Image: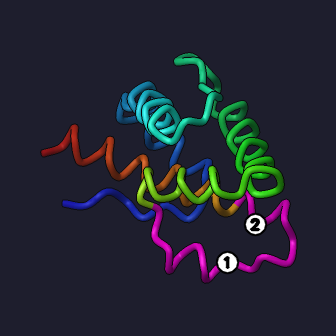
Amino acid sequence: MLPKNHAHIQELLDDAQKEALYEKLIAQLNKDFALANIEETFAPNISPESLKRELHAIVFQLIQEKFSEYLNLLYIIDVSETKIKALDGSDMVKLSEQVAFLILKREWQKVWFKNKL
């Protein structure tokens, strides 16, 4: 069985909460951010809305100001290069939101597999 392929961030976060894996998702994000030498961390009890907002803001800032760190984060998390290249980069706000979703999807896969296998 594979994890559900989510169409939206909210759907993914809802599933993480339903399966009682939301805190593990946050822990995985924090672990990979630390491995990528990105100082931002997420509180274990952060709300899904705040997580979406903060992750989006961090990705936006990384793209604008720290592009090499952004690329390193994507590498550490193992976000598909093909999926990143397929995104439309003309609107930076929309792009960073889509990248934040890809980051969460990949982190969710890691957490889901660790807990289901």
Residue toward you, 28 or 2: 28
Colouring mode (rainbow / by chain / secondary structure / one colour)? rainbow
Please give the residue where the numbered disc 1 appears in the rendered image. Answer: 87
Asked if 40 appears above or below 68 in the picture, the reply is above
Is disc 1 in contact with disc 2, using a CB cutoff of under 8 Å? yes
Identified at 56% across, 16% down, the residue is: 45
User: Which residue extends farthest front?
Assistant: 68
- In the rendered image, the quadrant that contains the C terminus is top left
For residue 95: magenta? yes
Residue at 42% of width from left, 64% of height from top? 5
Please state which amino acid type lies under the numbered disc 1. Answer: Leu
In the rendered structure, which disc, 1 or 2, sits on the residue that comes first in sequence? 1
- Judging by the rendered image, the residue that carries numbered circle 2 is 95
Count neighbours of disc 1 (C-alpha within 10 A) and say few if under 14, some if 14 to 19, many if 20 or more: few
Task: Identify the element where label 2 is drawn.
Answer: helix
Residue 65: where, in percent of width, then height?
81, 51
Name the residue located 35 percent from the left edge and 35 percent from the top edge: 19
> What stretch of residues is rendered in magenta?
79-97
Q: Which quadrant holds the N terminus?
A: bottom left
